[in-house]
Image (cartoon, coloured by chain):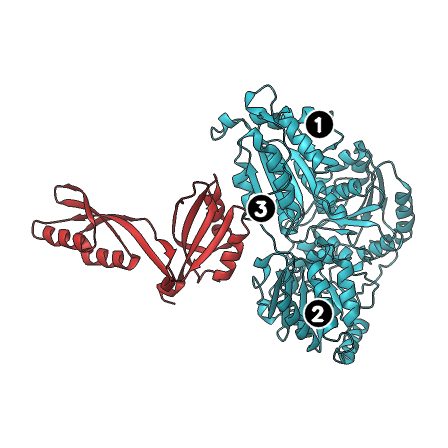
Chain colours: A cyan, B red
Amino acid sequence: MKTNGGAALIKALELEGVDVIFGLPGGAILPVYDPIIDSPIRHILVRHEQGAGHMAEGYAHATGRPGVAMVTSGPAATNIITPLADAYMDSVPMVVITGQVGTAGIGTDAFQEVDTVGITRSVTKHNELVTNAADIPRIVREAFHIATTGRPGPVLIDIPKDLVDPTNPNSALDWYWPDSVDLAGYNPRLDGDPALIEDAARLINASQRPVLYAGGGILKARAAESLLALAELLDIPVVTTLMARGAVPDDHPLCLGMPGMHGNYTAVTAMQESDLLIALGSRFDDRVTGKLDAFAEHAKIIHVDIDPAELGKVRRPDVGITGDCRLVIDELIKALKQLGAPENQPDRSSWKSTISGWQEKFPLSYVQSEPGDLLKPQFVLEQLRDNTPDDCIVASGVGQHQMWTAQYWKFQHPYTWINSGGLGTMGFAVPAAIGAKVGRPDRMVWAVDGDGCFQMTAQELVTAAAERIPVKIAILNNAYLGMVRQWQEMFYEERYSEVYLSPDLPDYKMWAEAMGCVGMRVESPEDVLPAIQRANEVDDRPVVIDFRTDASEKVFPMVPAGKSNSDIVVGPEGLR
Amino acid sequence: MSPATRHHILSVLVENKPGVLARVSGLFARRGFNIFSLAVAPTDDATRSRITIVVDVESAPLEQITKQLDKLINVLQIDELAPADAVERELMIVTVTVTPESKPELLSLTEEYSGAVLDEAGDRITVSLGGTPEALDAFTSQMGAAVVAYQRTGRIALPRITS
């Protein structure tokens, strides 16, 4: 069948099962937007290309399916670099299609030309500049395969305009659809080496103080059930990193919650005092380890990751297993049982009682505000947590509000927590929440945002209002770039430099209303619950609540940057 | 570490496509790995190229370098060649100043190194020499101040044939 590159691209996306594209048209991608009119694929017209990228990420986080974004060349391509970098850091499956100037114009500094594949090379798992229209079906097929297999990540396809423009002979091709993908240089290993799995089982059997260190890879591998089975078989506690919150239910007795710079005392200290860390789909990020050479000094390491380059990148494992977390954990469970688990496990009752002692002695805490004072952000989060469904999806931006949400929310299901972990992208929450709601319209979706973050991407609420995507945004408005303010307070002698934003410039309620949302402002504790209840009832448009919160409130516990995790500061009084 | 132990040779088979060299060199830059020398050319199979990279393993563990390289989709195979297990050669062209007295010495040295005279005018001669990197080092140091300019290709290598 004779076709053209633009029609072939849309047909290829349909065959890949794409049901929604987040995008914004422009000159170079224009010909591809014509066949979209006749395609069953839903297109969501964003207001800024960064929004398209984060929406695709939110969609992917919530559904496990690759998010798809399509934008034009030049400034549109540069605007979507942040989401690409974000998705690369957090291993989010995403396919981004960018328009490019016509083949003959490449290299001539043509209008809206940038070297998109050059610029995005270090922030994509792979990228490809299409040079021949006949390659389009194959390249699309390969892009989805690369984005979704092995360690997931973003893949970018850059397509020159002449190859998709039906009026240009360069766009002509005979339609085909490859049966399979043949990439000689790409063969991710999925099953773990049985000998190494047995070594791991023996290390576990010899451990007195083991901790399961679950990272985002658990969720990417759809391994939450397997992880829980392993934890329960051996009765071993689990920490869930920022990227793995929800991988084990927070109310499960074995779940210790979040480790790291703002992790809770028990999760941080259990890792520090452990004699065996079983790292599953986690990468010893600096925000988890603190000062590296003082991190879990007496722990042996089992490290399972689908990306072999993670094994030994930061901390040398005693047993390093390349493979898919779900498959490796299932095999590990078999190996452990063969060796006699759970009956053969050493008596770890003193380790368990040490841990529960920490939990009792060092719970998360804050002091409720006095009447007439600003709201405590933790109080707002507790109210939100307790008055939304268990399977509510929560997205956040980056900063204090993100850490408080990760700490105070009780995640009971995998894929209910969406945030920007590795890159730390302010402005992530609003578009990510919109993408999540598009992917999971059956779920309630809240974004918890900061006032600084909200101002970076709020325009996408216009998209949400226009498309009737009823997300709900809770702004913890403390009128500051709160996390920076916290560091200036603690480490720069309270010399506040360029962190004040004002609580009412802009007026968030009016801004929300101007964007077609329901806008509310809440200033006192008794108004928090009614506002949340009112927001929960709105299902035809987005809702924004401006919660006026106390800027002096800081995120604790905290391991100061560069310090050992053993130097964790539990609260403002500086007590260990 | 001595230069010999700091420098490891990676023989990297890649798809012969636009941008592949940029992917490899970009990866080294991005991860902070140091390249000592790099040579690239198509192989007997026109769809593939071989990149011979001499890496400085003081900048990063060799294992991490090869694992990151292996993640590039266009990288097909990576062989680490320990200097003892590889045959290696490098090509150099060098322009030197000669006097009537020193010219015969240069010509005999060039012959000794199996080189050839490429160009000659006035008091300058350009010769080409192939050899191990160490031999080329020895030649340039022997020529000393007479060297006007030289260009080296960086080393290329293949594994030793084992019987």
In the rendered image, the quadrant that contains the C terminus of chain A is bottom right
Picture coordinates of residue A123 (x, y %)? 58, 46
Left or right position of A61 against A442: left
Instruction: Please tell me whether residue A209 is drawn above or below residue B80 in the rendered image.
Output: below
Q: Which mark is residue A381?
A: none
SS for callout 2: helix
- Marked residue chain, label 1: A
* Residue shown at the point (73%, 25%) measured from the top left: A37
Q: Earlier in the sequence, mark 2 or mark 3?
A: 3
Q: Which mark is residue A335?
A: 2
Question: Element under label 3?
Answer: helix
Say which element carries label 1. Answer: helix
Q: CA distance from mark 1 to mark 2?
A: 51 Å
Q: CA distance from mark 2 to mark 3?
A: 38 Å
Residue picked out by circle 3: A123
- Residue A36: which numbered mark, if any? 1
Task: Say which amino acid is labelled 3.
Answer: Val
- Residue A81 showing in the rendered view: no
Q: Residue at x 66, y 74 (%)?
A: A203
Mark 1 Cα-neighbour bin, 10 Å: few <14, some 14–19, many ≥20: some
Q: Position of residue A61 (x, y in %)?
A: 73, 48
Q: Which residue type carries mark 1?
A: Ile
**Sequence-first disc among 1 and 2:** 1
Report in which chain the residue with disc 2 lies. Answer: A
Do badges 2 and 3 share one subunit?
yes
Q: Residue at x 87, y 36 (%)?
A: A540
